[in-house]
Amino acid sequence: MPQPFALFDCNCMVGRSPVRQPGAFFTVAGLLEEMDRVGIEQALVYSSVAQHYDPATGNRLLLDELAAAGWPKRLHPCWVLLPHTTHEMGADSAEVVVERMLAAGVRAARLFPTQHRFSLSDWCAGPLLRALERHRVPVFIDFGNVHWSDRNTDWDALYRLLKDHARLSVVLVHEGIGSDRYLYPLLEAFPDLLIETSYYQPHRGIEAICRRFGHERLLFGTGMPVWAPGPAVSMLAYADISAEARRAIGSENLRRLLGAVS
């Protein structure tokens, strides 16, 4: 299903989910097939093993799976990271962790602070956040919300992170309909905070963000394969926004972030 605007999905996973999702793909080939079906041109992907078992193992497995598939140019790896202090990332400094990531061709990082049980505060994650900030690596933060009524997001920790790391591009993943009273003050105060769209479904929410803060603050994402891509594609396709804004949200904003990594 070709789209009249390019789509670069910032939120895709490869691998099996601990909770079986009937009909869901779990391979690189399955992801590409689903992307073709709904008209998604490119995707940023992380490993389910990195989320649900061990980040270092999952990150290596992701690169191996992409290599085995001929490293499709349409897919871009995203590593799941932890603070370095337990040496679970295989290095004794955060800078080395990030340098290894960049050397492997990976230009985005994902954090699961709630699921992986670490604090985003500087006493815990500070060295990692500073290393990512130095290299302008965009950081996707997933607090594990799966329902609109979930209250997993640590908004105070997010505020401190944004305040202490002003040059860090932070993408908040899978925030839903009940988030605006927290989100708007942060979007107003911190220009490098962005929202991934897969679960952001307030009535005319995309339009309101574009009008108030600019279309640069939104990234298209689907949450595949745990969530179906159709609603996210339709939400952007039918949003009452300009063609320029649709292109920016659909792909250009993510390309800009990845292109700034050094």
Image: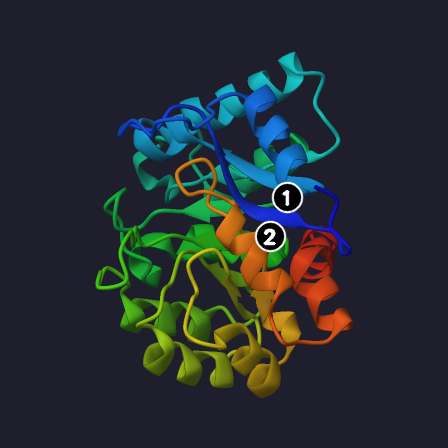
The residue that disc 2 covers is: 137
> Would you place residue 91 above or below residue 150 in this image?
above
Which residue is rendered at x = 72% and y = 34% of the image? 74
Most distant residue in the top direction: 68
Per the image, label 1 sits on a secondary structure element best described as: loop
Q: In the rendered view of the protein, which quadrant contains the N terminus?
A: top right
Check if mark 1's residue and mark 2's residue have beta carbons within 8 Å: yes
Q: Is residue 244 visible?
A: yes
Q: Decide which of tag 1 and tag 2 comes sooner along the chain.
A: 1
The residue that disc 1 covers is: 107
- Where is residue 68 drawn, in percent x and y? 64, 12
**Amino acid of disc 2:** Val
- Where is residue 108 drawn, in percent x and y? 58, 46
- Tell whether 51 sits left or right of 5: left
Q: How is the image coloured?
A: rainbow
- Where is residue 193 drawn, in percent x and y? 52, 70
Q: Which mark, residue 186?
A: none
